[in-house]
């Protein structure tokens, strides 16, 4: 998955930090489309961090990211 950070916000009332970002889950089915569109080549020029995770950790990320997004949305 690609995470594109936009803004880092400080919520003083809740004493938390919020990252405003876009998330693009990358699956085997979407990779050919990303390659044809030139998207992967376009982001290849930018500095990126690659983090290897095992199957269990990937499952965890897939569950917690949507939950965190909903939690932030509910706090508005």
Image (cartoon, grey):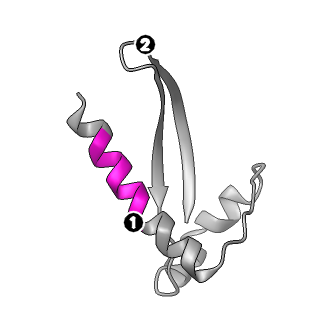
Residue 34 showing in the rendered view: no
Local crowd size for mark 1, using a 10 Å CA cut-off: few (<14), some (14–19), many (≥20):
few
Q: Out of 66 and 22, give the one closest to the viewer.
A: 66
Label at residue 12 = 2
Q: Position of residue 2 (x, y in %)?
A: 57, 60
Q: Earlier in the sequence, mark 1 or mark 2?
A: 2
Q: Is residue 73 left or right of residue 51?
A: left
Q: Position of residue 27 (x, y in %)?
A: 50, 80
Residue positioned 75% across, 55% down in the render: 49
Q: Is residue 3 above or below residue 33?
A: above
Local crowd size for mark 2, using a 10 Å CA cut-off: few (<14), some (14–19), many (≥20):
few
- Helix or strand or loop: what does disc 2 sit on? loop
Q: Out of 5 and 75, give the one closest to the viewer.
A: 75
Q: Position of residue 64 (x, y in %)?
A: 41, 58
- Helix or strand or loop: what does disc 1 sit on? helix
Residue 40 showing in the rendered view: yes
- Give the magenta-colored segment's residue range: 63-71
Task: Please tell me in which quadrant of the rendered image residue 44 appears.
Answer: bottom right
Q: Out of 31 and 39, give the one closest to the viewer.
A: 31
Task: Please tell me in which quadrant of the rendered image residue 12 appears.
Answer: top left
Q: Is residue 16 left or right of residue 36?
A: left
Residue located farthest toward the top when viewing the structure as drawn:
12
Residue positioned 52% across, 35% down in the render: 6
Is residue 68 a member of the stretch shown in magenta?
A: yes
Whole-angstrom CA distance, mark 1 to mark 2, is 27 Å
Label at residue 63 = 1
Q: Is residue 49 left or right of residue 27?
A: right
Q: Position of residue 43 (x, y in %)?
A: 67, 57
Q: Is residue 2 above or below residue 34?
A: above
Residue positioned 39% across, 66% down in the render: 63
- Which quarter of the figure is the C terminus placed in? top left
Residue positioned 55% across, 73% down in the render: 58
């Amino acid at each position: 998955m690609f995470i594109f950070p936009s803004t880092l916000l400080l919520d003083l009332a809740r004493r938390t930090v919020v990252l405003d970002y876009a998330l693009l889950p990358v699956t085997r089915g979407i990779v050919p489309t990303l390659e044809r569109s030139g998207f992967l080549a376009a982001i290849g020029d930018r500095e990126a961090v690659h983090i290897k995770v095992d199957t269990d950790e990937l499952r965890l990320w897939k569950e917690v990211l949507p939950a965190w997004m909903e939690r932030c949305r509910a706090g508005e």
